[in-house]
Image (cartoon, grey):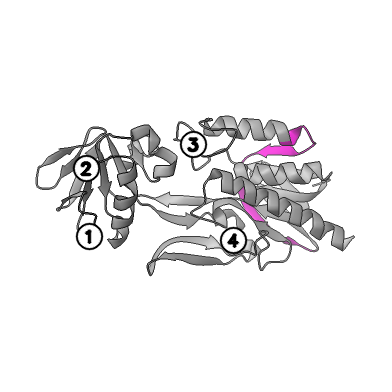
Amino acid sequence: MSERYDVIVIGGGAAGLSGALTLARARRKVLVIDGGQPRNAPAEGVHNYLGRENVAPRELVRIGREEAGGYGARFADGEVVRAYRDGDDFTVETRDGAHRARRLLVTTGVVDALPDIPGLAEGWGHWVLHCPYCHGWEVQDQPVGIIATSPLAAHPALLWTQWTDDLVLFTNGQDVPGVPAKVKVVDGLVARVEEQGVHLQSGEVVPRKALVVQTTLAARMEAVRDLGLETSVFEMQGLPVATYVAADPMGKTAVPGVWVAGNLADPMGQVIGAAAGGMKAGAALNMDLLMEA
């Protein structure tokens, strides 16, 4: 640990790389540590990202690294196993060593928890989808199924009518009020799914080209537990749907010296929003360091 960085960024997706780019352009000594497992890795392309529409997720990471690296940002590939306050600084440990910094930007994101239905995990990000703004154009006018995981399933049922008229909502044991009249409702439990259809426990098979599932989002906190960050619960219509780390509009948390950005701070945000959050956090971190001098 001979080197002392101004900021270590934990997580190298859109938020982390955007923060690193901002800090590097501010002539800060910054290190990005990333385990190489982006949440959107299964997807074929990133959408609604102005100037980078349909770019592959890993290609966006490559471009971001190249841009931030051009201003002096450094990178370490590997999983963070622990991060903690060490006197006036922070120490971030990986399996390959430890690094020291004056401040931290944590962009570890969230983890999608899928229902325990055989076949969903294998299709995740391909023909098992969650967001019409991310995937709706690609399956427009095709037969789409929505598997209810809570009473909130009427919301995606309404939303997806913008992209297709051939919608089936599988209640899967849930009581789902307010389903639009144009959406066909199929009761019964789902036994398994495959790329071409949904198999019910009754033996009925309903052909579908794509499936929509609402996941539960959990803040990815394992490596940063020792920092003292606390998670909050994000609710929709009174039901918990995600956990996240609360922060001010610039990403500053209640833990001195620690900022957050991306889905860790905004679990419902898309990639372009994550990048914007990283940029704001980077600017705030630079000013915080200036105020200390």
Q: Is tag 3's residue or tag 1's residue first in the polypeptide sequence? A: 3
Query: From this viewpoint, is residue 253 visible?
Result: yes
User: Which residue is the site of mark 2?
Assistant: 192
Left or right of 209 on screen, residue 269: right
Question: What secondary structure is marked by label 1?
Answer: loop
Amino acid on which the number 3 mark rests in the picture: Ala
Q: Is tag 2's residue or tag 1's residue first in the polypeptide sequence? A: 1
User: Which residue is the site of mark 3?
Assistant: 41
Labels 3 & 1 near each other (Cβ < 8 A): no
Labels 3 & 2 near each other (Cβ < 8 A): no
User: Which residue is the site of mark 1?
Assistant: 174
Q: CA distance from mark 3 to mark 2?
A: 24 Å
Q: CA distance from mark 3 to mark 4?
A: 25 Å
Q: List the single residue furthest toward the right.
A: 293
In the image, what residue occupies the spot 76% across and 39% down? Answer: 73
Q: Is residue 82 magenta?
A: yes
Q: Which residues are magenta?
A: 68-87
Above or below for 251 versus 213: below
Left or right of 213 on screen, residue 200: left
User: Which residue is the site of mark 4?
Assistant: 225
